[in-house]
Image (cartoon, grey):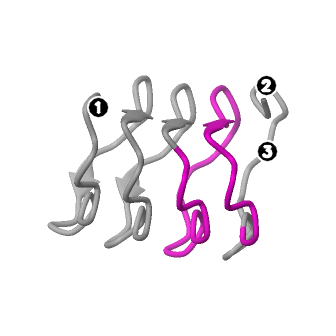
């Protein structure tokens, strides 16, 4: 649980090696954007909360490799544009 920490950026590959992580809560921080490979390595992640940030756009393939993701929360952001491939590979996504 990393919510409410005033985090403003994620390093590329910052979660690499956390293969068993199933839930990541980054809600209520200060993200304005997401790096293209910011979530690489989170193969078993099932729930990702990015709500209540300042995200304006989602990168192409921003969630690549997250085949097991079922819930993606992006509410209360400033998303004005989506890339055609923003959600590519999220074959198990059930809730957006």
The x and y percentages for residue 75 are 40, 25
Of circles 3 and 1, the one toward us is: 1
The x and y percentages for residue 40 are 57, 71
Q: Residue at x 54, y 53 (%)?
A: 44
Quadrant of the frame with the N terminus: top right
Q: Classify residue 28 as left or right of residue 65.
A: right
Q: Quadrant of residue 53?
A: top right
Residue beneath label 1, please?
Answer: 96
Q: Quadrant of residue 4?
A: top right
Q: Residue furthest left?
A: 84
Element class at badge 2:
loop
Gap between marks 3 and 1 measured at Cα: 22 Å
Q: Earlier in the sequence, mark 2 or mark 1?
A: 2
Gap between marks 2 and 3 measured at Cα: 8 Å
Q: Classify residue 70 as left or right of residue 82.
A: right
Q: Which mark is residue 31?
A: none
Residue 85 forms part of the magenta stretch:
no
Quadrant of the frame with the C terminus: top left
Q: Which mark is residue 4?
A: 2
Question: Neighbour class for label 1 at 10 Å: few (<14), some, many (≥20)?
Answer: few
Question: Neighbour class for label 2 at 10 Å: few (<14), some, many (≥20)?
Answer: some
Q: Quadrant of residue 3?
A: top right
Q: Residue at x 62, y 41 (%)?
A: 22
Start-end of magenta stretch: 16-45
**Of residues 75 and 91, the one drawn nearer to the viewer in this rendering:** 91
Q: Which mark is residue 7?
A: 3
Gap between marks 2 and 1 measured at Cα: 21 Å
Q: Earlier in the sequence, mark 3 or mark 1?
A: 3
**Of residues 83 and 25, the one drawn nearer to the viewer in this rendering:** 25
Determine whether label 2 and label 1 are within 8 Å by CB. no
């Amino acid at each position: 649980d990393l919510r409410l920490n005033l985090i403003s950026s994620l390093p590329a590959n910052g979660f690499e090696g956390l293969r068993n992580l199933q839930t990541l809560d980054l809600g209520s921080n200060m993200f304005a954007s997401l790096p293209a490979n910011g979530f690489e390595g989170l193969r078993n992640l099932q729930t990702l909360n990015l709500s209540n940030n300042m995200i304006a756009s989602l990168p192409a393939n921003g969630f690549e490799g997250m085949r097991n993701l079922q819930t993606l929360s992006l509410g209360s952001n400033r998303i004005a544009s989506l890339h055609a491939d923003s959600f590519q590979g999220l074959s198990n996504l059930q809730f957006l």
